[in-house]
Image (cartoon, coloured by chain):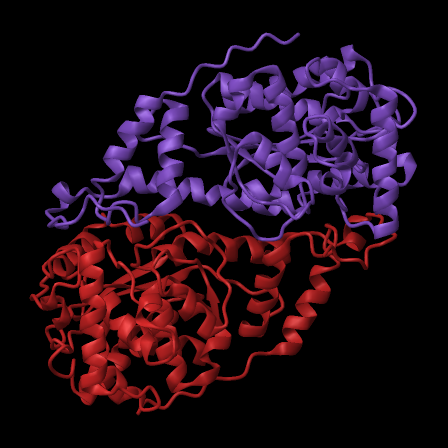
Chain colours: A purple, B red
Amino acid sequence: MMNVSIPPIRREMAEQARAYIDQLTKPPGSLGRLEDIAAELAGMTGELLPRVTPPGVLVFAADHGVAAEGVSAYPAEVTAQMVSNFANGGAAINAFSRHIGALLQVIDVGVAAPIADERVIQKKVRPGTNNFATMEAMTMSEAEQALHVGYEQAVSVIGQGGRTLIVGEMGIGNTTAASALLATLTDEPLERIVGKGSGIREERLAHKRDVIRRALLLHQPDPAKPIEWLAKIGGLEIAAMAGAMLAAAERRIPILLDGFICTVAALVARQFAPNVAEYMIAGHRSQELGHDIALRLLGKEPLLDLRMRLGEGSGAAVAFPLFVAATAMVNEMATFASAGISTGEEKGEKQA
Amino acid sequence: MMNVSIPPIRREMAEQARAYIDQLTKPPGSLGRLEDIAAELAGMTGELLPRVTPPGVLVFAADHGVAAEGVSAYPAEVTAQMVSNFANGGAAINAFSRHIGALLQVIDVGVAAPIADERVIQKKVRPGTNNFATMEAMTMSEAEQALHVGYEQAVSVIGQGGRTLIVGEMGIGNTTAASALLATLTDEPLERIVGKGSGIREERLAHKRDVIRRALLLHQPDPAKPIEWLAKIGGLEIAAMAGAMLAAAERRIPILLDGFICTVAALVARQFAPNVAEYMIAGHRSQELGHDIALRLLGKEPLLDLRMRLGEGSGAAVAFPLFVAATAMVNEMATFASAGISTGEEKGEKQA
């Protein structure tokens, strides 16, 4: 299995950042969570004044055999069509990536149809997974290859200058795989885990839960054996996302999480290296039903809550300007001393 | 009184925008509040594909005589010191404005000390208000002048190309004035309206409430006579902020609200022209106690909730990238038809 060595967070640097932030020309604590972000980024990067731009945005695309069960509102062909849309720059993640100056890369890690577009990075491990309702989604070797694709792609985008990692996905059927993975990590019932994905009706949602319930009985997947777990009920893009996160944390690059699929991929990464989660900040709360449970398992409170549920990395890209604001605060603001400003008599008091 | 004529929102354009947004390559509704923002901006501007950059950020500074009652954690001299900090580019609003490409202007509408810095726009109506604990804060003529300063400054920044208006403030003691104004608009008790401002202790908070209670008894201010109301218990910068909002709405320029003081200024503007509020979007929920009540009175749900409470326009500036994302969505995304993507069988269903 992948041999990653993730360094511990530099807690003393986070503390030093907090002390410095309290000297900036504003009442202590008055920039709220921006102050928390800045301190966390200092701990992750080991730098008092971290840089977070440009972000690297990796969008991994793959198909899911389980889509044949009719668990999605869209036909499976949409995965390949959306990959073309990414290549042409017409998807939400393209628009958002341009405005945050991101290094955006689209990777075919397992789209069923051939993708000939040279603007898409070709790393297909296999053309879609098997339908895990009836058989294992992939072999353990394929799961490991998909993890490696993600790992190597993150190494590459970091090598190109990426200072924050955002991972997104495209894959019709992937909320079904993500829900199945999540279900094995908690005692919560499927009624609280499995949501409407891209927008299915209630009857189809009941069917989606049944498909997952049967698959879990069939495979008895065990998250303590993460490669086998991924092989049985995972997805190629989910494995790649987890691998990318492991590479980022290993290099002290902060990870800004997107929504449901991405948070499940973060939980997958944690099964390989528990402290990878220390390098993660949750970008937004998705409307997808199971996201709250996934966030709670990961121990993260999201920054935004805008009723978004698109995926692709879109929620993280929309949250990224908060990283910019937090680092602008520490990098650019004057201190009370440098600006010659009187401090408050009660400056030590932080508002409740 | 100021003669403003605010056009009604173009509701049919907002509806047209919603219909167009549902054709973009994403499940309907999946970009949540970004879709709402885009539709609202279309209604405000009258343009299906609105532009919101660059934003104009106007920071109005003024002193408050009531600061002599010891209602703030900081001495009154900090107003002028912070104005220097704004001029030197060292405050939070400077850092955030740079990163959103804003046209930032700092206006002295009533700082007590002389401000000689040419980087500060000199529009002092008077050197600070009177202490409204014992006398009226200013004359009605001065309140009107301050409104006009704001109005003219917004006209100016819009003339320079500003496509969104953000108004911020600096004024030691201004949460006291804003709380007093807000208290006259609602039956809520002062215990739910008057907060800690820049961060005072509980004893001082009780004193701040007493000062406001006595001032309201003394002056019997009536919001139905808005110039008199402002003159009795208002602030010069609060009047200017309200005036700026009136000018923006008159020109169909969207207004992105900051925190507590700004939201009270929005309520002031509404006393002059009720439909000005249709041009406002609330940027964030401040930690200042009374902000929720002010937002409820205005009928706005804020975009961000990051425990910020700084003022200066900082919360609005941090929220501004959401306007950028919303307009990037409508301006740059492909439609299902243009991208040749299969639509969902259940595309009509929006997730609850």
Q: Position of residue A127 (x, y in %)?
A: 84, 24
Q: Residue at x 68, y 72 (%)?
A: B15
Residue A296 or residue A239, whichever sits in front: A296
Would you place residue A251 above or below residue B27 in this image? above
Q: Position of residue B248 (x, y in %)?
A: 41, 75
Q: Residue at x 49, y 41 (%)?
A: A320
Residue B14 or residue B132, whichever sits in front: B132
Q: Position of residue A161 (x, y in %)?
A: 47, 26
Q: Position of residue B318 (x, y in %)?
A: 41, 52
Is there any visible trace of residue A19 in the rendered image? Answer: yes
A143 left or right, relative to B183: right
In which quadrant of the rendered view does residue B116 lie?
bottom left
In which quadrant of the rendered view does residue A69 lie?
top right
B218 left or right, relative to B169: left
Say which quadrant the N terminus of chain A sits in: top right
Residue B206 or residue A172, whichever sits in front: B206
B198 left or right, relative to A197: left
In which quadrant of the rendered view does residue A19 lie?
top left
Would you place residue B109 above or below residue B324 in this image? below
User: Furthest-left residue in view?
Assistant: B114
Q: Residue at x 57, y 35 (%)?
A: A296
B136 left or right, relative to A181: left
Is there any visible trace of residue A129 in the rendered image? Answer: no
Would you place residue A257 above or below residue B59 in this image? above
